[in-house]
Image (cartoon, rainbow, N blue to C red):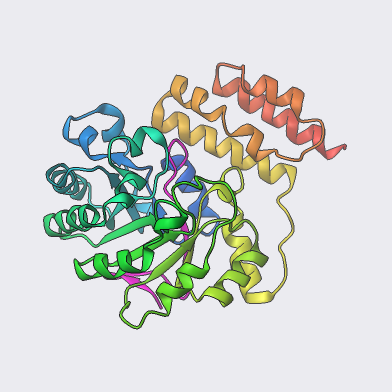
Amino acid sequence: MPKIGNIDLGDFPLLLAPMEDVSDPPFRRLCKMHGADMLYSEFISSEGLIRDAIKSRQKLDIFDYERPVGIQIFGGDEEAMALSAKIVATVNPDLVDINFGCPVKKVVSKGAGAGVLKDIDLMVRLTKAVVNSTHLPVTVKTRLGWDEQSINIEEVVERLQDVGISALTIHARTRSQMYKGHSDWSYIAKVKNNPRIHIPIFGNGDIDSPEKALEYRNTYGVDGIMIGRAAIGYPWIFNEIKHYFVTGKLLPSPTISDRVEAAKNHLLWSVEWKGERQGVLEMRRHYANYFKGIPNFKEHRQRLVTLDSSEEIIRELEVVRELKREV
């Protein structure tokens, strides 16, 4: 049974991945409702936290119903990472996570995220600085390496464990792959089979169905699975996986009414947290995901992404609920 510090995560935890512009409190709340065992914030710039940037500070918002919840930080400067970990500790999350996996250019170009994969010594120093600056458990999320010629995950895990991390999540792609191609979990299995490794190892990448989750759990021996893109617009995936693990049977797909209810809750919680204008605007990116594959949704989507008030959007969602019953 994997534990992170004193956090008991159950037999085989399902973790919600930290995703920029996705894993905010409203979305995390939905995923928690539908079976996610551990939640992570969007990644937060260490430099932004130190500068007191409003957007970075807002990402520190966590709520008791989310627990256990971790806050993820990124950066390429030891002093800034140490100080930001201290700032994070003031809001009392259950752990601090370090992002060494984000492949996007604006992060990598600053020598942060997956950019640190080019310099393992720096990765170790940054991690040690965070571990030494906080009483909270420290975890890491990273990738296999910078590219196929420099896959170094086995060395990375050993060295990060040696400086005191409590768990590690591996996205089974290189930085050069971004989110394309297939993930290669065989490298995660090599880490799990290393007798030196005693911390929990979680796998991430391409888990988009209960069948695949079971196959990967059995094949690669991970301690848990982190799910990212497959949960966007589909928070039900966590309970679907858990049900399949226990029964070997698939739960029925969410109904149109289930989808409307999820989108409505997401909207209401977003407005509550961000304010009416921001909540309405930022929800626009989610409707297509909630109703993916639903016949004749296009015209309703067009209205949902142009209406300016949450009341109007909720009325339109109710039209979607009723209309689809007749299809």
Point 83% across, 39% down: residue: 325
Indicate the position of residue 44 as horizontal and vertical percent values: 30, 40
Point out the image quarter for the C terminus.
top right
Whether residue 286 appears in this view of the structure is yes
Identify which residue, 57 or 319, lies in the foreground: 57
Point 56% across, 30% down: residue: 285
Main SS of residues in magenta: loop
Indicate the position of residue 99 as horizontal and vertical percent values: 33, 49
Indicate the position of residue 218 as horizontal and vertical percent values: 57, 77
Point out the image quarter for the N terminus.
bottom left
Residues drawn in magenta: 1-22
Q: Is residue 258 above or below residue 296?
A: below
Whether residue 62 appears in this view of the structure is no
In the image: residue 29, left or right of residue 264: left
Q: Is residue 25 above or below residue 11?
A: above
Point 55% across, 58% down: residue: 183
